Image (cartoon, rainbow, N blue to C red):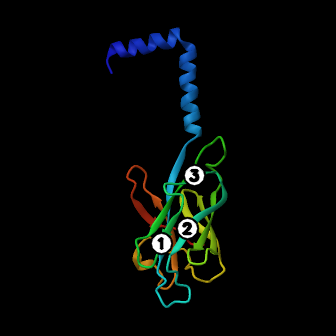
Amino acid sequence: MGIKSVLRARKFMATKPVGFITGVLTLFIMANAYSLDQRLNMNDRIPPGNPHYSEKGFTLKPSDHGYCMYGVYNPASCTSGYRTKSCYVMLHYAASFSHSCLFKLSIQDFNIINNDTGKVVATFQWYMKSGEPSIRNIRDSEKIMANATGYKSLDWVKNKLNIYSYKLKLGRGQAGQETANH
Protein backbone atom coordinates (compact mmCIF):
# COMPACT_ATOMS: atom_id res chain seq x y z
CA MET A 1 0.00 0.00 0.00
CA GLY A 2 1.61 3.26 -1.10
CA ILE A 3 1.63 6.64 0.60
CA LYS A 4 -0.94 7.97 -1.88
CA SER A 5 -3.39 5.21 -0.89
CA VAL A 6 -2.96 6.01 2.79
CA LEU A 7 -3.52 9.72 2.15
CA ARG A 8 -6.62 8.98 0.07
CA ALA A 9 -8.01 6.73 2.80
CA ARG A 10 -7.31 9.41 5.41
CA LYS A 11 -8.98 12.07 3.25
CA PHE A 12 -11.97 9.78 2.68
CA MET A 13 -12.35 9.13 6.43
CA ALA A 14 -12.18 12.86 7.16
CA THR A 15 -14.67 13.92 4.48
CA LYS A 16 -16.99 10.93 4.57
CA PRO A 17 -17.62 10.06 8.26
CA VAL A 18 -20.85 8.24 7.36
CA GLY A 19 -18.94 5.85 5.09
CA PHE A 20 -16.29 5.28 7.72
CA ILE A 21 -18.85 4.59 10.46
CA THR A 22 -20.75 2.26 8.12
CA GLY A 23 -17.53 0.34 7.42
CA VAL A 24 -16.76 0.00 11.13
CA LEU A 25 -20.32 -1.16 11.86
CA THR A 26 -20.12 -3.70 9.02
CA LEU A 27 -16.93 -5.15 10.46
CA PHE A 28 -18.54 -5.31 13.92
CA ILE A 29 -21.61 -7.10 12.56
CA MET A 30 -19.46 -9.58 10.65
CA ALA A 31 -17.50 -10.33 13.82
CA ASN A 32 -20.73 -10.99 15.71
CA ALA A 33 -22.09 -13.24 12.97
CA TYR A 34 -19.01 -15.44 13.07
CA SER A 35 -19.72 -19.11 12.51
CA LEU A 36 -17.84 -22.35 11.99
CA ASP A 37 -18.35 -25.70 10.27
CA GLN A 38 -18.03 -29.25 11.57
CA ARG A 39 -18.57 -32.62 9.97
CA LEU A 40 -20.77 -35.46 11.27
CA ASN A 41 -20.18 -38.92 9.76
CA MET A 42 -22.01 -42.24 9.68
CA ASN A 43 -20.49 -45.59 8.71
CA ASP A 44 -22.67 -48.69 8.27
CA ARG A 45 -20.98 -51.89 9.51
CA ILE A 46 -24.16 -54.02 9.70
CA PRO A 47 -23.58 -56.98 7.32
CA PRO A 48 -26.17 -59.02 5.38
CA GLY A 49 -27.61 -61.74 7.63
CA ASN A 50 -27.66 -59.45 10.67
CA PRO A 51 -31.25 -58.83 11.86
CA HIS A 52 -30.66 -55.06 11.59
CA TYR A 53 -29.21 -55.14 8.07
CA SER A 54 -30.79 -52.66 5.66
CA GLU A 55 -30.48 -53.39 1.95
CA LYS A 56 -31.09 -49.74 1.05
CA GLY A 57 -28.92 -48.47 3.92
CA PHE A 58 -29.53 -45.86 6.58
CA THR A 59 -30.08 -42.12 6.28
CA LEU A 60 -28.68 -39.57 8.71
CA LYS A 61 -31.02 -36.58 8.76
CA PRO A 62 -31.47 -33.56 11.05
CA SER A 63 -34.70 -33.27 13.00
CA ASP A 64 -36.22 -30.04 14.29
CA HIS A 65 -34.17 -26.90 14.52
CA GLY A 66 -30.94 -26.67 16.40
CA TYR A 67 -29.85 -24.13 18.98
CA CYS A 68 -27.11 -21.70 17.95
CA MET A 69 -27.08 -23.41 14.56
CA TYR A 70 -27.29 -21.89 11.10
CA GLY A 71 -28.19 -25.26 9.67
CA VAL A 72 -27.12 -28.57 8.22
CA TYR A 73 -26.05 -28.30 4.62
CA ASN A 74 -23.99 -29.61 1.72
CA PRO A 75 -25.41 -32.25 1.93
CA ALA A 76 -28.25 -31.79 4.42
CA SER A 77 -28.65 -35.56 4.81
CA CYS A 78 -26.65 -38.61 3.81
CA THR A 79 -27.21 -42.31 3.14
CA SER A 80 -24.74 -45.05 3.98
CA GLY A 81 -24.97 -48.73 3.08
CA TYR A 82 -22.95 -51.69 4.28
CA ARG A 83 -19.25 -51.29 3.47
CA THR A 84 -19.84 -48.23 1.35
CA LYS A 85 -17.86 -45.10 1.94
CA SER A 86 -18.86 -43.18 5.06
CA CYS A 87 -21.44 -40.50 4.46
CA TYR A 88 -21.43 -37.13 6.17
CA VAL A 89 -23.32 -33.90 6.71
CA MET A 90 -21.81 -30.49 7.31
CA LEU A 91 -22.94 -28.57 10.37
CA HIS A 92 -22.85 -24.79 10.28
CA TYR A 93 -23.00 -23.52 13.85
CA ALA A 94 -22.89 -20.07 15.42
CA ALA A 95 -19.97 -18.78 17.39
CA SER A 96 -21.10 -15.20 17.88
CA PHE A 97 -21.08 -12.82 20.81
CA SER A 98 -24.40 -11.24 19.84
CA HIS A 99 -26.36 -14.46 20.34
CA SER A 100 -24.22 -15.61 23.29
CA CYS A 101 -23.48 -18.73 21.28
CA LEU A 102 -19.78 -18.40 21.92
CA PHE A 103 -20.38 -19.27 25.57
CA LYS A 104 -23.25 -21.74 25.16
CA LEU A 105 -23.79 -25.08 23.48
CA SER A 106 -24.55 -25.32 19.79
CA ILE A 107 -26.98 -28.23 19.45
CA GLN A 108 -28.64 -30.15 16.60
CA ASP A 109 -30.87 -33.24 16.89
CA PHE A 110 -30.61 -36.06 14.32
CA ASN A 111 -32.61 -39.10 13.24
CA ILE A 112 -31.27 -42.27 11.68
CA ILE A 113 -33.78 -43.79 9.30
CA ASN A 114 -33.81 -47.38 8.01
CA ASN A 115 -34.40 -46.92 4.27
CA ASP A 116 -35.99 -50.38 3.93
CA THR A 117 -38.76 -49.65 6.45
CA GLY A 118 -38.77 -45.84 6.53
CA LYS A 119 -38.71 -46.01 10.36
CA VAL A 120 -36.58 -43.84 12.62
CA VAL A 121 -34.39 -46.41 14.36
CA ALA A 122 -32.23 -44.08 16.43
CA THR A 123 -31.94 -40.45 17.48
CA PHE A 124 -29.11 -38.50 19.01
CA GLN A 125 -27.89 -34.98 19.60
CA TRP A 126 -24.74 -33.42 18.15
CA TYR A 127 -23.30 -30.59 20.19
CA MET A 128 -20.33 -28.28 20.31
CA LYS A 129 -18.98 -27.11 23.63
CA SER A 130 -15.65 -25.38 24.20
CA GLY A 131 -14.68 -25.99 20.59
CA GLU A 132 -14.98 -29.79 20.77
CA PRO A 133 -17.72 -31.66 18.83
CA SER A 134 -19.48 -34.48 20.61
CA ILE A 135 -22.56 -36.71 20.54
CA ARG A 136 -25.00 -37.39 23.37
CA ASN A 137 -28.54 -38.52 24.20
CA ILE A 138 -28.44 -41.55 21.92
CA ARG A 139 -31.87 -43.19 21.87
CA ASP A 140 -31.52 -46.41 19.96
CA SER A 141 -34.91 -48.10 19.65
CA GLU A 142 -33.47 -50.89 17.50
CA LYS A 143 -30.18 -51.31 19.43
CA ILE A 144 -28.26 -51.04 16.18
CA MET A 145 -26.00 -48.09 16.83
CA ALA A 146 -22.63 -48.14 18.50
CA ASN A 147 -21.76 -45.37 20.86
CA ALA A 148 -20.06 -42.46 19.20
CA THR A 149 -16.86 -43.90 17.83
CA GLY A 150 -13.54 -42.53 16.70
CA TYR A 151 -12.60 -41.11 13.34
CA LYS A 152 -10.22 -43.92 12.45
CA SER A 153 -11.62 -47.19 11.14
CA LEU A 154 -9.81 -49.09 13.91
CA ASP A 155 -12.28 -47.52 16.34
CA TRP A 156 -15.38 -48.62 14.41
CA VAL A 157 -17.61 -51.27 15.96
CA LYS A 158 -18.54 -54.26 13.78
CA ASN A 159 -22.24 -55.07 13.26
CA LYS A 160 -23.25 -51.50 14.24
CA LEU A 161 -23.78 -48.09 12.73
CA ASN A 162 -20.86 -45.92 13.74
CA ILE A 163 -21.51 -42.23 14.27
CA TYR A 164 -18.62 -39.84 14.70
CA SER A 165 -18.02 -36.14 14.64
CA TYR A 166 -14.57 -34.72 14.41
CA LYS A 167 -13.12 -31.29 14.60
CA LEU A 168 -12.18 -29.67 11.31
CA LYS A 169 -8.85 -27.92 11.59
CA LEU A 170 -9.22 -24.26 10.76
CA GLY A 171 -7.65 -23.19 7.51
CA ARG A 172 -6.93 -26.69 6.25
CA GLY A 173 -10.32 -28.40 6.08
CA GLN A 174 -8.76 -31.63 7.33
CA ALA A 175 -10.09 -33.88 10.03
CA GLY A 176 -8.68 -34.29 13.49
CA GLN A 177 -9.46 -36.95 16.04
CA GLU A 178 -13.09 -37.25 17.10
CA THR A 179 -13.64 -36.29 20.69
CA ALA A 180 -17.13 -37.61 21.41
CA ASN A 181 -17.41 -39.42 24.69
CA HIS A 182 -20.78 -39.23 26.30
Q: CA distance from mark 3 to mark 2?
A: 18 Å
Between marks 3 and 2 in the image, the one whose residue lies nearer the viewer: 2
Give the amino acid at mark 2.
Leu
- Report if the CB atoms under discs 1 and 3 are less than 8 Å apart: no
Label 2 close to label 1 by CB (< 8 Å):
yes
Is residue 76 placed above or below 116 in the rendered structure?
A: above
Crowd band around label 2 with a 10 angstrom C-alpha radius: few (<14), some (14–19), many (20+): many
Residue name at image x 58 percent, y 15 percent: 18
What residue is shown with label 1? 80
Q: Is residue 181 above or below residue 51?
A: above
Q: Nearer the viewer, residue 170 or 55?
A: 55
Counting residues from the start of the chain, the first of labels 3 and 2 encountered is 2
Above or below 176: residue 73? above
What residue is rendered at 59% in x and 52% in y? Answer: 71
Secondary-structure class at tag 3: strand
Amino acid beneath label 3: Tyr
From mark 1 to mark 3, how far is it between C-alphas? 24 Å
How far across and how far down the image is residue 70, in percent? 59, 49
The image quarter containing residue 108 is bottom right
Residue 57 on image: x %, y %: 50, 75
The reply, left or right, for residue 52 in relation to residue 81 is right
What amino acid does circle 1 point to? Ser
> Label 2 belongs to which residue?
60
Q: Which residue is mark 3?
A: 93
173 horizontally vs 78: left or right:
left
Q: Which mark is residue 145?
A: none
The x, y position of residue 41, in whole percent, is 49, 67
Total residue callouts: 3
